[in-house]
Amino acid sequence: MGSCDGKVAIVTGASKGGTGTAIAVRLAAEGARVTITAREETGLDATRARIEAAGGECLVVPADLADPAGARRDLVPATEDAFGSVDLLVNNAATGGYAPFDEMTPSTLERGLQVNLWAPWELMAAVVPGMRERGRGSVLNVTTFAAELPPGPPFPTNKPAKAGAVYGSTKAALNRLTVSAASECEGQGVSINALAPQAAIATPALVEAGWVNETMFEPLETMAEAAVALLTGDPDVLTGRIAYSLQLLVELDRAVRDLTGAELVDGWQPSDLPAVIAAQEADLAGRGWPAAYDFGRVHSPLHRQEPT
């Protein structure tokens, strides 16, 4: 039996062969029936084909999550009609990109807020009450390193520090929502967490873009494995976390499997990951971000931890 047998999941942003697709395929491999959504119907059909080829059940509900009056309102009712009550919600869809704050237009900011904050908020509000009533359920919000406060001055030189105002601030708001909702659901059998890649995920689009140092990439499988760990973990222990994928896998000593759940992924097991994390930390330190993962989340000189 898979860890998600009998469960119903919704995964947003699952059309481009990246993180959302990987998580949706892996949840289906673990036994979940999965609703997927995004704007691009061709990509959604490709993800559905992968799920069904592996014997899973999938419902496609195309939606532009930036439209508050659009099809995002149909996601939960359509899923409940097709599969039953929602047990797992993965808010993966994101937008924003990197650009100086004073070059961002109001429409870009509005779109970022709708996709990165309001849509997850509304979907959480739609499914969490039922999870509470049943005493079980999990929400996972996919977040980013760009949501962290850059230490300075002097400030780091990378894009999250120099051009992450809209993307980073909307995801920082999502992080705060995550912890608040987890606190409100404490002791009720419902876990609510956020998960970021350690640095960057080797999605087809990001690899093709070419601006991320190869050292900073991790495969889709590590992100999917960390997602399953949070979605199926003990809700009294694994909740309210703003987790980083590789750190979480080391902490839990969790084996990393391929997206079918059948085979171990060579070179990306817990014993391999400390060296990968160290290399990524060294890269960030070279860009002016020392002790990058020692987050006190308060970066004034009086509170900043010295590198060890």
Image (cartoon, grey):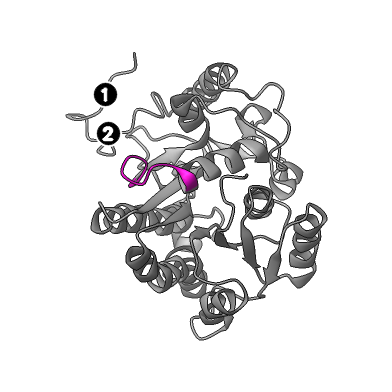
- Quadrant of res 66: bottom right
User: In the image, is 219 to the left or to the right of 194?
Assistant: right
State the residue position of label 1.
305
Q: Main secondary structure of the magenta part?
A: loop
View extreme (top): residue: 308
Tag 2, which secondary structure? loop
What is the three-letter code of the residue carrying label 1?
A: Gln
Res. 194 visible in picture: yes
Please report the bounds of the magenta region as a residue range: 232-240
Mark 1 or mark 2, earlier in chain: 2
Instruction: Mark 1 and mark 2 in contact? Answer it, CB < 8 Å.
Output: yes
> Which residue lies at the image location 69% right of the left edge and 52% below the top edge?
25
User: Mark 1: few, some, or many residues within 10 Å (few <14, many ≥20)?
Assistant: some
Between 154 and 243, the one lying in front of the other is 243
User: Mark 2: few, some, or many residues within 10 Å (few <14, many ≥20)?
Assistant: few
In the rendered image of this protein, does residue 56 appear above or below residue 22? below
- How far apart are the alpha carbons under marks 1 and 2? 8 Å
Between 85 and 10, the one lying in front of the other is 85
Residue 32 in the image, given as x and y percentages of width and height: 61, 56
Asked if residue 7 is among those painted magenta in the image, a careful observer would answer: no
Residue 177 in the image, given as x and y percentages of width and height: 33, 59
> Which residue lies at the image location 54% right of the left edge and 75% below the top edge?
80
Residue 225 in the image, given as x and y percentages of width and height: 58, 39
- Quadrant of res 176: bottom left
> Which residue lies at the image location 33% right of the left edge and 33% below the top edge?
295
Res. 211 visible in picture: no
> Which dot marks residue 296?
2
What is the three-letter code of the residue carrying label 2?
A: Gly
User: In the image, is 130 to the left or to the right of 282?
Assistant: left
Total numbered circles: 2
In the rendered image of this protein, does residue 262 appear above or below residue 104? above
